[in-house]
């Protein structure tokens, strides 16, 4: 599966992308862990001085350590800065790999015991496991192969004994394999968890028959638009003579009619419009940033399209019409419930005036 996990959804339901879903759950703790890593990178400097004293070797080690500090800071920046939002994991693993490599290079060049490299690598692998739901196999294999090959190259360059090299490999390969298994398992579990959360969100948000927003979700989203948008309009519509359809042809046919009307509503409204089934044969549409004249055009388009839509059921052809009420948000309307009440009143007027028409 690609690095970005996508699931097909109804345009009315918005759910976090995989990376953001897990990022919101992981990065808070990972950021704290990164601050600890930065602190350790700084606190090691006095111990480096105690090991090397006031020598040129210490200056080289200090340069490597400060390079690692820089990359530790960049890891933190990658977590919190919006610039890295679309490539956060790649940035974190790249900067983390470079930080580890700079520490490993200086330690190996200037004679520190090889286990000090292991300590730094253990910290890095722990960070990797924290990110594992977001780390793909490709990312892990690239960064770990680079790290192991880099350390082996530097060990050979500085003339480390074969015993040291074997010790490193004996330590590194099983650990890298173990972490790889953890990354793969957590990634798979993360994808399954995300899919379950997504499907539950769909089930809780959509009406099962119409595939439109259910009443609860429609009111929740619509109220946000009421509070945040200056210009909104509300369309309320009701299927004409729907009880007659159920009584004549049965409820299965009524369900077909509801599905047909719902399909028209999805087709004839815009991406930003909030479309829901409010109950029975009644539907609501919130039109953000839309004045009354614009709402009338959309409503008339919906009415005409439904009027020419034919529902075929058991070789019977059923023609469907709807009555529509429209209301625009204004200073005279005190709250969202009043907006809905006035839209319902206009819908009632459309029914009283003969149906298959718009009142506003």
Image (tube, grey):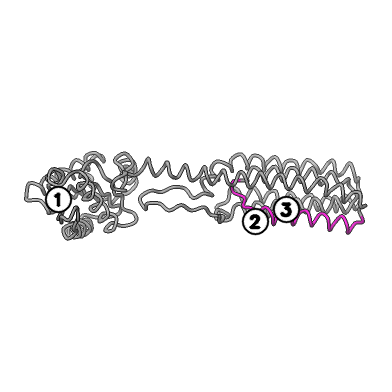
Q: Earlier in the sequence, mark 1 or mark 2?
A: 2
Q: Earlier in the sequence, mark 3 or mark 2?
A: 2
Is 126 or 101 nearer to us in this picture? 126
Q: How many marks?
A: 3
Is residue 246 shown in magenta? no
Position in image of residue 18 (x %, y %)? 51, 49
Which residue is disc 1 drawn over? 323
Can you tell which mark lies on residue 275?
none
How would you classify the magenta stretch by its main secondary structure? helix
Asked if the residue at tag 2 contacts the one at tag 3, i.e. Cβ–Cβ closer than 8 Å, the answer is no
Which residue is disc 2 drawn over? 138
Position in image of residue 250 (x %, y %)? 17, 44
Q: Secondary structure at mark 1?
A: strand
Magenta-highlighted residues = 133-159
- Within 10 Å of the Cα at label 2, are there few (<14), some (14-19), or many (20+) other Cα atoms? few
Position in image of residue 220 (x %, y %)? 33, 41
Q: Earlier in the sequence, mark 1 or mark 3?
A: 3
3D distance between C-alphas at marks 1 and 2 = 56 Å
3D distance between C-alphas at marks 1 and 3 = 65 Å
Side of 51 where 6 appears, left or right: left
Side of 33 where 50 appears, left or right: right
Position in image of residue 350 (x %, y %)? 11, 49
Can you tell which mark lies on residue 144?
3
Q: Secondary structure at mark 3?
A: helix
Is 41 or 7 nearer to us in this picture? 7
Place residue 118 in its image quadrant.
top right
């Amino acid at each position: 599966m690609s690095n970005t996990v996508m699931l097909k959804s109804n345009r009315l339901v918005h759910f976090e992308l995989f990376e953001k879903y897990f990022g919101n759950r992981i990065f808070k703790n990972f950021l704290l862990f990164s601050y600890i890593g930065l602190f350790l990178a700084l606190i090691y400097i006095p111990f480096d001085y105690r090991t090397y004293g006031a020598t040129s070797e210490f200056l080289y080690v200090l340069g490597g350590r400060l390079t690692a500090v820089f990359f530790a800071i960049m890891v933190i920046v990658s977590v919190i800065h919006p610039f890295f939002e679309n490539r956060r994991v790649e940035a974190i693993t790249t900067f983390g790999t470079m930080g580890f490599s700079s520490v490993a290079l200086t330690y190996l060049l200037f004679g520190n015991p090889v286990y000090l490299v292991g300590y730094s690598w253990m910290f890095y692998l722990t960070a990797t496991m924290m990110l594992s739901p977001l780390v793909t196999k490709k990312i892990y294999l690239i960064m770990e192969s680079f790290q192991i090959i880099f350390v082996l190259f530097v060990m050979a360059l500085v003339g480390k004994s074969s015993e040291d090299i074997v010790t490193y490999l004996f330590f590194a390969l099983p650990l890298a394999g173990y972490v790889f298994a953890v990354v793969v398992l957590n990634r798979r579990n993360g994808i399954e968890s995300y899919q379950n959360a997504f499907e539950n969100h769909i089930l809780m948000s959509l009406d099962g028959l119409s595939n439109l927003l259910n009443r609860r979700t429609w009111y929740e989203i619509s109220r946000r638009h009421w509070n945040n948008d200056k210009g909104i309009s509300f369309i309320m519509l009701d299927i004409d003579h729907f009880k007659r359809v159920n009584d004549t042809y049965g409820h299965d046919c009524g369900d077909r009619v509801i599905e047909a009307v719902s399909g028209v509503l999805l087709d004839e409204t815009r991406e930003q419009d909030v479309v829901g089934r409010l109950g029975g044969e009644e539907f609501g549409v919130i039109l953000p940033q839309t004045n009354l004249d614009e709402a009338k055009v959309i409503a008339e388009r919906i009415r005409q399209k439904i009027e020419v839509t034919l529902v075929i059921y058991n070789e019977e052809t059923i023609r469907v019409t709807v009555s529509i009420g429209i209301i625009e948000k204004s200073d005279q309307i005190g709250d969202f419930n009043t907006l809905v009440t006035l839209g319902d009143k206009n819908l009632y007027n459309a029914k009283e005036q003969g149906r298959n028409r718009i009142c506003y």
